[in-house]
Image: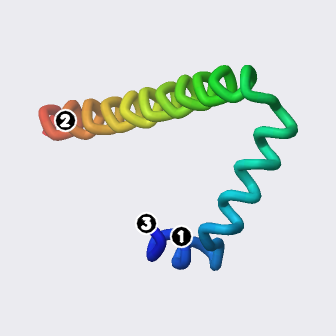
């Protein structure tokens, strides 16, 4: 994990710990699970949207190929 942290825009372990503490201080322990749950739902909705667009494109391509 340390290698990943060092490669991620020069952010090291100490910086990540400081960022986590600041987030904890700003939002409190009770709000963080709610924020993460909302973030997870947002990511899930984004993935479903991307998959829906991919399905529409493949369906369109398939229907164009069957017309020829």
- Mark 2 lies on a secondary structure that is helix
Task: Give the numbered dot on residue 62.
Answer: 2
Residue carrying label 3: 1
Q: Quadrant of residue 32?
A: top right
Q: Are marks 3 and 1 in contact (CB under 8 Å)?
A: yes
Query: In front here: 53 or 32?
Result: 32
Left or right: 42 as drawn, with respect to 67: right
Near mark 1 (Cα within 10 A), the count class, few <14, some 14-19 or many ≥20, is: some
Left or right: 39 as drawn, with respect to 18: left
Query: In front here: 1 or 43?
Result: 1
Q: Are marks 1 and 2 in contact (CB under 8 Å)?
A: no
The residue drawn where x is 58% and y is 23% is 37
* Closer to the eye: label 1 or 2: 1
Left or right: 46 as drawn, with respect to 39: left
Q: Quadrant of residue 51?
A: top left
Near mark 3 (Cα within 10 A), the count class, few <14, some 14-19 or many ≥20, is: few
Where does the C terminus fall, quadrant-wise? top left
The residue drawn where x is 87% and y is 38% is 26
């Amino acid at each position: 994990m340390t290698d990943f942290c060092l490669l991620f825009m020069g952010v090291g372990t100490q910086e990540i710990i400081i960022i986590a503490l600041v987030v904890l201080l700003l939002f409190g322990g009770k709000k963080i699970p709610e924020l993460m749950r909302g973030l997870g739902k947002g990511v899930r909705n984004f993935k479903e949207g991307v998959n829906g667009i991919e399905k529409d494109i493949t369906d369109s391509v398939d229907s164009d190929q069957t017309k020829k």
